[in-house]
Image (tube, grey):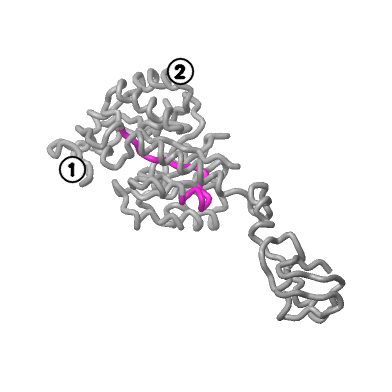
Amino acid sequence: MTKTIIIAEAGVNHNGSINIAKKLVNVAKEAGADFVKFQLFIPEKLVTNYAKKAKYQKISNDKKNTQLEMLKNLNLDNKAQTKILDYFKKKKIGYLCTAFDDKSFEFILKKKLKFIKIPSGEIDNFVYLKKLKKINNKNIILSSGASNFLEVKRAINIIGKKNLILLQCNSAYPTPLQDLNLKTLLFFKKKFKIRVGLSDHSLSLIAPSNAVAMGASLIEKHFTLSRKMKGPDHKSSLEPKELKQMIEYIRETEISLGLKKKFITKSEKKNRIVIRKSIVAASKIKKGSKFTKNNITVKRPGSGLSPMKFFQILGKKSKRNYKIDDLIFE
């Protein structure tokens, strides 16, 4: 059984607080996630002072401030991230972090994380992608939100396919179910012949399991302590019990997928005789009488002659006497 990589995306749902960040780590550990991922950025290096907020950011946050002011309130700098990393080691859960600017990217590289995540917004950033091309032996996760096929293809051509996991993603927060387009996973697998996954911004608990059934090897999902908290992403995130339930669904899906072949399993073998039928006497049959459609039929159990031989014995003479419902053995 192949185990799906599950990334619990904390993002900026810590609201700039190390204590909340630690609580998120605890929740993810309890839920059974493999990694918790945060975001690292220097606000002034990420956005201009006039960059507007998205509609969902205005709804769930202070409507007056700019994107820059919002990000300043949500920032955990390098020093804070280092403290959090020590807490991850204590809790024995994987730490990941997405970098949104050059200095943050350098910090991430020094930490030698298991995966480097390329956020959807950087899929057309040639300079960013080119840096990744130069990094050897790194597992790279590429998110494809708000992009078309040609943009995805171009990004992959720049960074290469080696050790790459391509995520189907929709950048609406929260994503409507009809816009998840899980079939894109099959499309990506066919076109690029690489591992695929899902970065899911919907509130569905089942969609990630469906993605696993379609071949996703990695699931990334936003989570929060409470959707009632103030901040841009809380309303698009799962709460603790939901995160745990989602992960349980994924693990059940992994088990139920089984093997790519058809065979009789150990659990069902004992019921084989019970559910199948055998050829039996429909009336009394004397020795030497011919078997006809009138004096034989098929009934349970399946411990006698298989119904597949029904027409083979028609017209043959009986070698013994049979009572009604006796199994036919010839």
Q: Is residue 135 above or below residue 254?
A: above
- In percent of the image, x 47 and y 38: which residue is there? 6
Judge whether 311 appears above or below 330 on screen: below
**Measured from the top left, where is residue 140 in percent x and y?**
50, 39
Task: Give the class, few, some or many, for how many residues have Cα within 10 Å of label 2's Cα (few <14, many ≥20).
Answer: few
Q: Quadrant of the N terminus?
A: top right
Indicate the quadrant where residue 311 lies: bottom right
Mark 2 or mark 1: whose residue is earlier in sequence: 1
Q: From the viewer's perspective, is residue 31 above or below residue 330? A: above
Q: Amino acid at mark 2?
A: Lys
Separation (CA) of disc 2 from disc 1? 36 Å
Q: Is residue 157 shown to the viewer in this render? A: no
Which residue is disc 2 drawn over? 90
130 relative to 311 in the view: left or right:
left
Left of 130 or right of it: where is 27?
left
Q: Residue at x 14, y 39 (%)?
A: 63
Q: Which residues are magenta?
A: 210-224
- SS at circle 2: helix
Q: Which mark is residue 120?
A: none
| Residue carrying label 1 | 59
Count all numbered tags in the image, as a single digit: 2
Residue 76 at x, y percent in the picture: 31, 25
Judge whether residue 61 is colored magenta.
Answer: no
Residue 119 visible in the shown view: yes
As rendered, which of 277 and 109 lies closer to the eye?
A: 277
- In the image, 298: left or right of 31? right
Closer to the camera in the image, 74 or 258: 258
Q: Is residue 219 magenta?
A: yes
